[in-house]
Amino acid sequence: FDGLQLKPYWLTLRNRNDSLITLAEKDNCLRLYGAGKLTSTDEVAFAAQRQTAFSFAASATFSATLGAEEDAAGIVCFQSEEFHYCLQICRKNSANIVQLVKVCGGKTEIVAESSEKIADNAKLVFEAEAQMQNLFFRYSINGAKPVQLGSAQDASILSTEKAGGFIGTIVGMFAT
């Protein structure tokens, strides 16, 4: 990230809100301030790019400070509020953990979660990799070897044939 505004190829949900998404706080870094949930039609701290190939790899390096149990941040393969996958750091039982969340037909399912507790401001790398109709999610903490969370996931739930709509899948980062 460079400059003070996102490039035009970065998409947001609904209206771009500069109080939730900023490039001004740290050189070459995007800062997201948590807002509404991805499963709602509220304003969301979200920046993504269109998926342009059946197979791809996407990653984000970040740190997160979470306060409340409903706080989360991570990467998302997003078709709509009712169809997406999130690899996220979140709070559960007063500890930070990594979860893989699937939303299909509006139903939210925690597919897998780490047993490792993660310190605030740890350096995290989250990865999403598509191999045709299979999605794989990995994470690493403070430079450790990446760990796959869960098994291969069905990317076809993100298709317009299953999810409806017309926009296709976008891949990016979010904070709630």
Image (spheres, grey):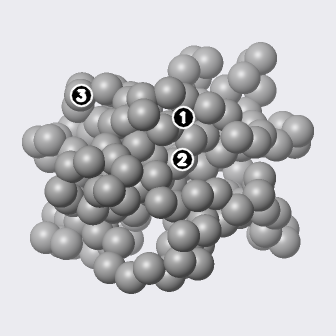
Residue 3, by quadrant, is bottom left
Question: What residue appears at the point 37 percent right and 50 percent down from the top-left corner?
Answer: 162
Q: Mark 1 points at which residue?
A: 72
Residue 159 shows in this picture: yes
Mark 2 vs 1: CB contact within 8 A: yes
User: For the residue marked with disc 1, what is the amino acid?
Assistant: Ala
Q: How many marks?
A: 3
Describe the element under mark 2 as helix, strand or loop.
Answer: strand
Residue 114 position (above or below residue 135): above
Disc ID at residue 41: 3
Which dot marks residue 101?
Answer: none
The residues bearing labels 3 and 2 have C-alpha atoms spaced at a distance of 17 Å
Check the picture and name the quadrant holding the N terminus: bottom left
Q: Which amino acid does label 3 sit on?
A: Thr
Task: Bin the neighbour count of mark 3 within 10 Å (Cα to Cα): few under 14, some 14-19, many 20 and up.
Answer: few
Of 55 and 99, nearer the camera is 55
For mark 2, what is the residue? 86
Cα separation between marks 3 and 1: 17 Å
Q: Which of marks 2 and 1 is in front?
A: 2
Task: Estimate the spatial distance between the alpha carbons at disc 2 and disc 1, rounded to whole Å.
Answer: 10 Å
Q: In this view, does 30 lie to the left or right of 152?
A: left
Q: Which of marks 3 and 2 is nearer the N terminus?
A: 3
Picture layout, residue 165 above or below residue 81: below
Looking at marks 3 and 1 on the same chain, the residue that comes earlier in the sequence is marked by 3
The one nearer the camera, 23 or 110, is 110
Residue 143: image location, x then y, percent: 78, 69
Secondary structure under tag 3 reads loop
Q: In this view, does 56 lie above or below 149?
A: below
> At label 2, which amino acid type do we have?
Cys
Residue drawn where x is 26% and y is 48% of the image:
164
Residue depicted at x 32% and y 56%: 161
Task: Classify mark 1: helix, strand or loop.
Answer: strand
